[in-house]
Image (cartoon, rainbow, N blue to C red):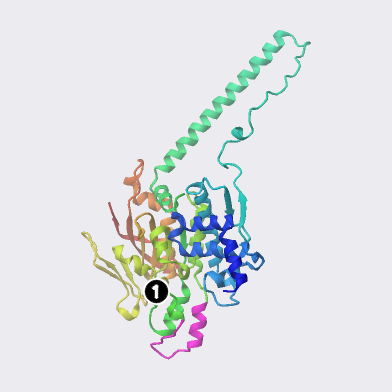
């Protein structure tokens, strides 16, 4: 380290803004999130060192997320998604642990340069407590020409109008509250309020369709241990003749399906969704801690999302979609009376019958929930997505849980589907399990 760099580091350590950043990354909300901590440390250090002008999505991606030099952020939104999470996590810090801090730091939208500001007042303090005592408005002079009887008549009319308006407001309010009460008692409302929570980040994860193409090219699936660390992109392993350069090109792309994107958009538009707590993230950018700490909505089978392997141990209906490992099927680990132990899927069935599953289970940390939609085909996944977003289907199936304040229990559903011209018809309920 040069003398100039040493002086700069010493000066930074004495800067109260840098000291604030150090306290933030040591707090409960950041200590277990290394990526968010690295993000905040990097942009803060660059800004406080006079290098804020170099901060943009590409440079942050290269420095913090180890993206290759000159990569195209339009094909990779990892910086944007983490910036959204960082903004929310900073808000949480200053609302809770850092409520007494005299400085505030934020990352404005559209920028990656942190802004440090003094905490002049509590933003949650009512306005009247900040403005001091209010003075009474000046009295308007009375109209001497108006007779007492006329004033009384006007007062009575005004009073009657007020009573009518008040009565109408009471009726409208009562009807609204009744409607809200009925809505909150429906199973579908209970499901989505457990998936979307103010205290949890909800991550929607479309399938990585690039993996499906790669599997066809190399002859085998990519397992989670290779996928999570990105090892599968470092060396191409083909079970049959293939073009390694073409495989590497496909692996670098971020393909997903239209049905998964349509499902993601539909989910974000349901009334219970919380936009500020929701993000869509590519499967490749997930981390194990996301499955422990967040609520997740996952679409696609293990072939297109190896993270399914991390949670399949919690499932009863397990979809086996690797043709090299045997017959394609859904395993029923604990069949009830009348259920089969296995439901086979034939990709060459002339009637185009398919299978799909829906799982609403705890996340790996037990502090949140996972909603997993799977199918052997895009049409199968679409059928499951339509079923779970249909309030009628969920409310009919779980009607015994309606009309009370209890939570909707975790559950799994097995559906049979028929594909017509690439689209799924209305699914058939084959089996379902509810867990205490």
Please say whether residue 303 is one of the residues in the magenta stretch.
no
The boundaries of the magenta stretch are 234-252
Residue 258 visible, this orientation: yes
Picture coordinates of residue 363, whole percent (x, y):
36, 59
- Residue designated by label 1: 303
In-front residue for pair 171/408 = 408
Please give the count of numbered marks on the rendered protein.
1
Give left or right: position of 161 versus 192: right
Picture coordinates of residue 391, whole percent (x, y):
43, 51
Question: Which residue extends farthest right?
Answer: 145
Image quadrant in which you'd find residue 298: bottom left
Q: Is residue 71 above or below residue 48?
A: below
Residue 425 visible, this orientation: no
In-front residue for pair 161/310 = 310
Q: Is residue 133 above or below residue 320?
A: above
Give left or right: position of 11 versus 332: right
Picture coordinates of residue 408, whole percent (x, y):
35, 49
Quadrant of the snapshot with the N terminus: bottom right
| Mark 1 crowdedness (10 Å alpha carbons): few <14, some 14-19, many ≥20 | many
Residue at x 54% of width, y 74% of height: 67
**Disc 1 on helix, strand or loop?**
loop
Question: Which residue extends farthest front?
Answer: 3
Please say whether residue 244 is one of the residues in the magenta stretch.
yes
């Amino acid at each position: 380290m040069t003398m100039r760099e040493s002086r700069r580091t010493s000066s930074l350590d004495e800067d109260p803004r840098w000291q604030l950043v150090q306290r933030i990354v040591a707090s409960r909300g950041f200590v277990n999130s290394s990526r968010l901590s690295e993000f905040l440390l990097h942009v803060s250090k660059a800004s406080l060192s006079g290098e804020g002008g170099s901060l943009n999505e590409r440079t942050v991606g290269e420095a913090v997320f180890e993206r290759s030099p000159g990569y195209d952020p339009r094909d990779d939104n990892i910086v944007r998604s983490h910036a959204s999470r960082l903004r929310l996590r900073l808000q949480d810090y200053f609302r809770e642990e850092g409520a007494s801090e005299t400085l505030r730091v934020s990352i404005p939208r559209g920028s990656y340069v942190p802004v440090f500001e003094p905490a002049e007042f509590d933003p949650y303090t009512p306005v009247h407590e900040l403005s001091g005592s209010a003075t009474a408005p000046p009295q308007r002079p009375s109209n001497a020409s108006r007779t007492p009887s006329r004033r009384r008549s006007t007062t009575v009319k005004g009073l009657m109008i007020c009573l009518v308006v008040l009565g109408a407001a009471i009726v409208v309010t009562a009807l609204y509250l009744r409607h809200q009460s009925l809505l909150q008692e429906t199973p579908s409302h209970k499901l989505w309020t457990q998936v979307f929570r103010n205290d949890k980040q909800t991550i929607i994860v479309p399938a990585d369709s690039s993996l499906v193409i790669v599997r066809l090219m190399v002859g085998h699936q990519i397992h989670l241990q290779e996928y999570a660390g990105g090892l599968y992109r470092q060396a191409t392993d083909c079970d049959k003749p293939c073009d390694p350069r073409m495989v590497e090109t496909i692996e670098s792309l971020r393909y997903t399906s239209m049905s998964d994107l349509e499902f993601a958009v539909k989910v974000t538009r349901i009334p219970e969704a919380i936009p500020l707590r929701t993000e869509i993230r590519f499967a490749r950018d997930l981390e194990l801690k996301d499955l422990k700490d967040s609520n997740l909505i996952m679409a696609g089978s293990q072939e297109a999302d190896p993270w399914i392997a991390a949670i399949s141990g919690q499932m009863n209906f397990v979809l086996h979609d690797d043709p090299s490992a045997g017959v394609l099927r859904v395993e029923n680990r604990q069949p009830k009376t009348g259920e089969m132990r296995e439901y086979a899927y034939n990709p060459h069935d002339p009637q185009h019958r398919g299978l799909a599953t829906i799982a609403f289970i705890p996340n790996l940390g037990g502090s949140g929930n996972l909603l997993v939609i799977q199918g052997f085909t895009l049409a199968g996944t679409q059928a499951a997505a339509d079923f779970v977003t249909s309030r009628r289907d969920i409310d009919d199936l779980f009607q015994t849980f309606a009309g009370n304040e209890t939570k909707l229990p975790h559950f799994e559903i097995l559906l049979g589907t028929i594909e017509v011209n690439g689209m799924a018809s209305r699914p058939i309920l084959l089996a379902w399990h509810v867990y205490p």
